[in-house]
Image (tube, coloured by chain):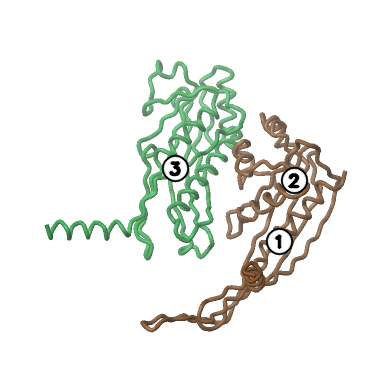
Amino acid sequence: MVRTLIILMIISMISACTTSVVVEGSVPTPLVQKIPARMGVYYPEDFRNFRYQEVIRDAGTWNIDLGSQNLSFFRNLSDALFVSVKEVHEPPLTTEEMRELDGIMIPYIEKYGFLTPSISGLKFYSASIEYRIVLYNKTGQKIGDWNIVGYGKSEGGMFSGDDAINEATVLAIRDGGARIAIELIDRPAVQAWLQEVRAGSDVPAGAE
Amino acid sequence: MKHLALLALAVLLTGCASSRIEQVREASTGINHGEAMVILGRASYNEKQTEESFTDCIADALAGGENPIRFIPQEQFKDDLYPWFEPRTAPTSADELGRLFAQPGVQQRINEANVRYLAWIDGDTVTIDSGGSMSCTISTFGGGCFGVSYWEEDASYEASIWDLQTLTSTGQISADATGTSYLAGLVLPIPILARPGNAACKGLANQLREFIVEEG
């Protein structure tokens, strides 16, 4: 009985120093011109279940779970970006599987980080997320590979550090998504690939 | 009598804030029945950002009163036009509105919401000086606070008003307010708050209303 009590006390002491944030919030559907291509999208396991842990002196351990929020946002973003989207397994895909597709997109999360006011000395909680977007053409050759960083910050209340980190992270996802939605189509390599798609050709595009 | 005492206490506990409003007009304005306005706070990724509470204060002040203006909430507007009004993608000058309106769906969304004016609010409230000292003690025989501390705040904001019908800038209004707040410890801590941010909000909102409504 005493032993159980001690274990329970230790668990409660440890959990008191741990802040867990499951990122939640809504990000709207982008209002952009659809890229005229039929896209296969592969979401790697690390992307689907992205978690971040950091131990901060005086602020304990922070566990941030971006997985489902991030995945749901990217599904929405992909649907808005391309004329048609199909989730696929890990490339390479067979010729038969690529028959109805013009290319494959794979998003990765390269880095995630956050700052609390006690670390930055500012009035805000802030978060940043670095995405890497890789595009392949119909024959599996790489069209391009781009890193895009999203930033978000939130005015934190005295007792709402986890809420503020959640809000800053959603804003970082939103900011990164905005840049992907606006900038992807303007990349020279994407434009070259789209010309091939229009021409119905599978000539490899020159990577940037 | 009780109400009078409360009123006197409230006046006593409110510090003074002095404010200055300036206006530059570039084009004539006026708003028709049913037309709406949007107030957006400028955000950047350095240490400065217009507080959401300040833009909310302006929107609340303009939506009430004698000549209320119809407002589209900031979040709704940004969501409806995502990704074009995000901190790093939003137009930085009215000259960029033409390019933005050429994007598919953007002009249609703005027309559907019947938004006539967009006001960008840029600025913040900062503490520019502080001093004094106050200490509080507590013991088995009781406790109390003694001393005086003060802090001086400067609220500096500018509104840039764009006409979404003509795609031009119609003018700017700036509001500056300063005030010193005190915390006096006379057994109980007594705050005397100046609230320059509130003074800047009221001054800017009143001027903005005149700017939009009162010129035909």
Q: Label 3 neighbourhood size at 10 Å, few (<14), some (14-19), many (20+)?
A: some
Chain A colour is green
Task: Give the image quarter of residue B22.
Answer: bottom right
Q: Which residue is mark 2?
A: B68
Vertical position of residue A120 compared to residue A80: above or below: below
Residue B188: where, in percent of width, then height?
Answer: 51, 77
Q: Nearer the viewer, residue B112 or B24?
A: B112
Kindly indicate which chain is depicted in brown in the rendered structure: B
Using the image, name the chain to which the residue with label 3 belongs: A
> On the rendered image, what quadrant is the N terminus of chain A found in?
bottom left
Task: Say whether residue B128 is visible.
Answer: no
Q: Position of residue B10 (x, y in %)?
A: 64, 69
Amino acid found under the numbered disc labelled 1? Ala
- The reply, left or right, for residue B91 in relation to residue A47 is right
For the residues labelled 1 and 3, the Cα–Cα distance comes to: 35 Å
**How far apart in space, not on screen, are marks 2 and 3 (Cα)?**
35 Å
Q: Residue at x 53, y 56 (%)?
A: A155
The residue tagged with tag 1: helix, strand or loop?
helix
Q: Is residue B53 above or below residue B187?
A: above
The chain containing the residue under callout 2 comes to: B
Q: Chain of mark 1?
A: B
Query: Residue A24: which numbered mark, if any?
Result: 3
